[in-house]
Image (cartoon, helix red, strand yellow):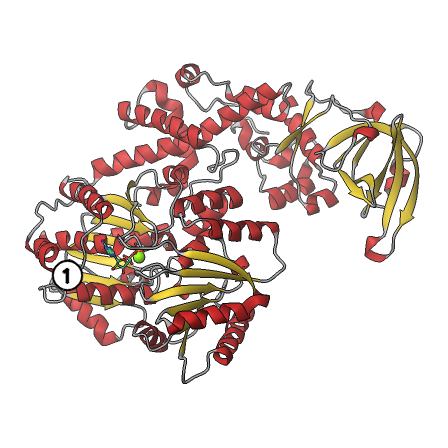
Amino acid sequence: MYQNLNFLDTEITFLPGVGPKRAELLNKELNIFTFRDLIYYFPYRYIDKTKFYKTAELSPDMPYVQIRGFIKGYSFEGQGAAKRLSAVFSDETGTIKLVWFKGTKWIPGNFPPGPEYVIFGKPGLFNGAINIVHPEIEAVAQKSENMGSVLQGQYSTTEKLKNQFITSKVIHKIIGNMFQLPEFKIQETLPLYIIEKYNLPLLGESLRAIHFPVSQSEIDRAVYRLKFDELFYIQLNIFRFKLNRTTKYKGLVFQNVGAKFNDFYYNHLPFPLTNAQKKVMKEIRKDLGSGKQMNRLLQGDVGSGKTMVALMCMLIAIDNGFQACIMAPTEILANQHFATISKMVNGMDISVKLLTGSSKKRTRDNISESLRDSSLDILIGTHALLEDKVIFRNLGLVIIDEQHRFGVEQRAKLWRKNVSPPHVLVMTATPIPRTLAMTLYGDLDVSVIDEMPPGRKPIKTAHYYDTKMNMVFGFLKKQIKEGRQIYVVYPLIKESEKMDYKNLEDGWDTFVRNFPPPEYCIAIIHGRMTSELKEESMRLFKSGQAQILISTTVIEVGVDIPNASVIVIESAERFGLSQLHQLRGRVGRGNDQSYCILVSSVKLSKEAIGRLEVMVRTNDGFEIAETDLRMRGPGDIEGTMQSGMPFDLKISDLGKDGQIIEYVRQIAEEIITADPQLNKEENFILAQNLKSLFYKKESWRDIS
Ligand code: ADP
Ligand code: MG
């Protein structure tokens, strides 16, 4: 039935032991459709099946254990939801209890007292005695064959699968069935010369070993080979496209640093640049004059002064006769950039305009015209810039602020707004750990602003339970007396969530009660307000008339009001680490000591406590991002960055596999440099695999 196909492309339903019903469950629950999906479904842990414990040895801090012994009898205990089936299980050293909350009807019938059983489970402690809840049981006599393997893989399953008896053991068994098929065949994915040069086990061998290992060292080698594969192909893909891009597209050459740049630099610069800003400008200028199209990621912690760098780059573009634009993820931020940049170039002959979703038709027409006749130099805006109607005469530089807020397609759209692609500078305050950057943005060059403007004091962060709000209010009043301003932020996960708005409204009421007019003025801002009202609130706060700004996370990115030196984050436990860090970055922008107060309920999960502790301990964005990566896993981070990772990582862990990534990156670079199109005979397999792995993504992959 599968002669014409690659063996691994066979649908799972044709595997002995599966069939249409189980196939459907595996599709739905685990995303397993083909033999390949199944064979790449790896165990998350191994159990040493040769090791048996005695009941007297057990303690509740042990992981999963195996014991041999006898069931002495069953009884029901407890009431209602706590009702459970309990069995007395003993060996020659003592007895423990086995407990079931589910399946209580069929357990005693299937495992009657009498024969010797092997049970498997995690020891726990209940009322001072050792028990095992929901153990696996099998009679000693029928212990299944394992292809000679003593370490048995454990596969994760879902509740639904377990209810249909597709347990870890069943998955293990059907994988075994696949290996036993006469047609079984694994095609090697790496050329022999790589396998030999880097001393890797063969793919087929590794896949066997990861499912049916005979020793731990065999597992280690298999895991290494499979990670190598996965990460190597990502890097290979990145280098191939980077090379393609630079050969395919000629970059606009910005030869001069001209009159406008110099006028600004010598006469309008409001403060001396930091060394880091200077260094980054040098890197960017080199790109712009090189004849290559720039694709650069500018990374700098919140408040490090990226906007200034953006402006100076735009001035270089203008000096070379080009237009420039900057796109920001929120209207508030676009407004702010417009205000800051207009002010900075005030008195110079530079035309700056703002385009957002709420721009009126007249403004739009006016912008269109000035874009066409080249009288407009800088266009600042939101997603509105992406609209087809926005046509530049000669767009030379695109800057995307807080780029992690934009999808790849959106970035690509701007890229296409000029006949020859403009230079692209994407900016982010989300400190991306090195390994992640190498995987996701490996085709971007990276510049880092690793220094804050002088005079900044580290923000002091404290965590308070919401039962202690009176203390917080007292502190805030003191700060206001000293002339400071305060942000209060409420979580708003989805704009539509009613509950979130209720929190915001309740919060507003509480604050107004504690900070009554006319002594105090409180402004509010959230996504449901019209842009006029939003602007009015921002104006009140920016001008200092309002001492407190209550808001949702609409202020999360970019907002820059140096006199606001305190931020109170309500329900802080509901935010992720990088979001907390971004929010905290709203303060600490002036010379005053700044504070971040994290307010949470008393009931906290272990993870939430961990997050809040990290925030209190450090201001270092990179440390926070690394911790975030370790705590949450890259999947989530990837999600928030919307970067479109080419595929899900099946075995690699970006938080932990940094060394392998660096290693395979070097190898990939060497190969592509020697054989850019992978045309050499020895690289045939590489070309073929790249195509099948990344085929669908090619349309946008050369655009960053
Ligand atoms: P971010 O990198 O988070 O976008 P901004 O560009 O908003 O940071 O800059 C943060 C604040 O620091 C702004 O008020 C800006 O004017 C100020 N700033 C930027 N560069 C310098 C500098 N070299 N010296 C002093 N202040 C600076
Ligand atoms: Mg910014």
**Viewed as shown, does residue 247 lie left or right of 197?**
left
- Nearer to the camera, 112 or 55: 55
> Callout 1: 10 Å neighbours few (<14), some, many (20+)?
many
Asked whether 677 or 57 is in front, the reply is 57
Q: In screen coordinates, is 19 left or right of 704?
A: right
Q: Quadrant of residue 522?
A: bottom left
- The relative height of residue 366 versus residue 33 in the rendered view (above or below) is below
| Residue 409 visible in the current orientation | yes
- Amino acid type of the residue that numbered disc 1 sits on in the rendered structure: Asp
- Is 411 situated left or right of 628 in this image? left
**What residue is shown with label 1?**
377
Residue 396 visible to the viewer = no
Q: Residue at the left extreme?
A: 259
Q: SS of the residue at dot 1?
A: loop
Percent position of residue 704, x then y: 31, 45
Query: Where is residue 363 drawn, in percent x and y?
Result: 22, 73
Residue 339's spot in the image, x, y percent? 23, 67
Residue ID at (19%, 66%): 342
Where is residue 470 shown, x and y percent of the image?
Answer: 54, 71
- The structure residue drawn at horizontal position 66% and vertical position 41%, both measured from the top left corner, is 157
- Residue 358 higher or lower than 124, as above or below: below
**Image quarter for residue 663?**
top left
Q: Is residue 267 toward the left or the right of residue 478 in the image?
A: left
Q: Nearer the viewer, residue 180 or 405?
A: 405
Name the image quarter holding residue 565. Answer: bottom left
